[in-house]
Image (spheres, rainbow, N blue to C red):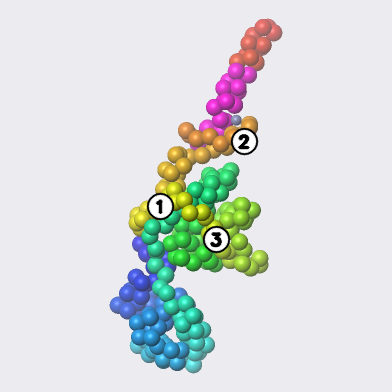
Amino acid sequence: MRIIFNEESLLEEMLEDGFSQKYPTFRELLVLAKHLRNTYGYGEKRIIGELESFCSEKIMDFNTTLSRGVFTKVAKEAIKKPDMRTPRYPIVFSGEEIEKIRGIPDFPAQKIIFSAISQAKSTGSPEFFSDSNKNLMFIVRISGEKVSKKYFIEKVSPIAYQNEIFEFVNRKSSFYKVLLKGGQNVVLSMSSDTEFLNAGKVYENFVGGVLGWCLSCGKEFYKLSGKHNLCEACGDENRKSLNRARVARFRGK
Ligand SMILES: [Zn+2]
């Protein structure tokens, strides 16, 4: 299972086995370009030349002319931001950040948003194309929730936006930025792939279980089962009033 954005392992795979599909993705070319920049200190022209020879070696019907524009773009970007993206541990959360997430009265959304922030923190870059199926589904997968990409875009992202956790970079697309303005007091920390890949569970354990919001008074409570919908006080009240109703019916006869 590959962790998205682990560019160092992506590089190793490419150097060994070539591209994942017949033609390279933008990310794959960028990773190669960054490698050429970091390891050999090449400039734009040299990077383009090396990418061309790498591609002609790996792709049978490779066309240099058609690829020139992309290579130039990739080389420029690699020079601007040459750091490889890899998961960076520990991934830490401050008390303020956790409070902000916990303020959202929807537990599955909390877990997905926590996972999205974990992903952002792991890459060191808070920006995602949330219309990239791969990124979204990775986040959903590590959250442990079984929801669709549509659900993420139409339900979860707007909630995160309303709570000032996501910021949309471009209103027309669903490209968003995760706002990382947590405080200094670290209360939760993930230090391995295993924890990161189970981010939703880590969050659930941290808050102490599955949270629910009382259908009657809106108060937060721990759900003991899927059908558990009322907090303790409202549950008691509900039982009492059912009893009163039964007694009244009995007397009425
Ligand atoms: Zn209640």
Residue where numbered disc 3 is placed: 178
Report the magenta residues as a range. 226-242
183 on left or right of 5? right
N-terminal-most mark, 1 or 2 = 1
Amino acid tagged 3: Val
The location of residue 231, given as percent across then percent down, is: 56, 30
Residue where numbered disc 2 is placed: 218
Q: Where is residue 15, by image quadrant?
A: bottom left
Q: Where is residue 241, by image quadrant?
A: top right
- The picture quadrant for ligand 1 comes to top right
Residue 132 position (above or below residue 52): above
Residue where numbered disc 1 is placed: 189
Residue 28 magenta-highlighted:
no
Res. 55 visible in picture:
no
Residue 202 position (above or below residue 128): above
209 on left or right of 2? right
Residue 237 magenta-highlighted:
yes
Residue sitting at x 43%, y 62%: 122
SS of the residue under disc 2: loop
